Image: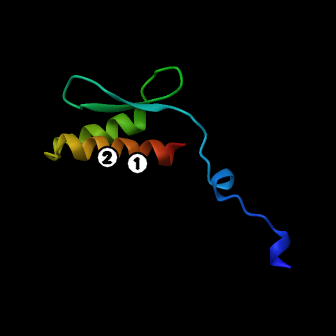
């Protein structure tokens, strides 16, 4: 019964290739942009507050990638 069902987890769990994380110069060192290169405003605000809490650059980058995955 279960042998007849083929599960391709890579296809099922694939996320669309929307947006990207970019390094920028300023108070917030990383940003998430859409396909047109426009910053995603809710993520920009969140990362700004995250930086204001004295978070490291590496943490901001990690959060930017996590938020990109969530936004997709």
Say which quadrant the N terminus sits in.
Answer: bottom right
Measured from the top left, where is residue 32 in percent x and y? 40, 33
Q: Residue at x 61, y 39 (%)?
A: 16
Q: Residue at x 42, y 45 (%)?
A: 67
| Relative to 51, residue 1 above or below | below
Q: Secondary structure at mark 1?
A: helix
Q: Secondary structure at mark 2?
A: helix
Q: What whole-number distance in Å separates the C-alpha atoms at marks 2 and 1?
A: 6 Å
Label ID, residue 66: 1
Work out whether residue 33 or residue 15 is closer to the camera in this orientation and state it.
Answer: 15
Taking the view exactly as shown, the residue that stands out farthest to the front is 3
Image check: 58 left or right of 32?
Answer: left
* Neighbours of disc 2 within 10 Å: few (<14), some (14-19), many (20+): some
Circles 2 and 1: CB atoms closer than 8 Å: yes
Say which quadrant the C terminus sits in.
Answer: top right
| Relative to 69, residue 26 above or below | above
Taking the view exactly as shown, the residue that stands out farthest to the left is 54
Measured from the top left, where is residue 60 in percent x and y? 26, 42
Image check: 68 left or right of 49?
Answer: right
* Neighbours of disc 1 within 10 Å: few (<14), some (14-19), many (20+): few
Q: Residue at x 52, y 20 (%)?
A: 36
Quadrant housing residue 49: top left
Measured from the top left, where is residue 61 in percent x and y? 29, 41
Label ID, residue 62: 2
Total tally of numbered discs in the picture: 2
Measured from the top left, where is residue 55 in percent x and y? 17, 46
């Amino acid at each position: 019964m279960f042998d007849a069902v083929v599960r391709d987890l890579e296809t099922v769990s694939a996320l669309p290739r929307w947006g990207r994380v970019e390094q920028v110069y300023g108070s917030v060192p990383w940003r998430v942009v859409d396909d047109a290169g426009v910053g995603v405003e809710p993520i920009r605000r969140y990362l700004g507050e995250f930086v204001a809490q004295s978070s490291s650059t590496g943490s901001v980058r990690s959060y930017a990638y996590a938020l990109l995955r969530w936004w997709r």
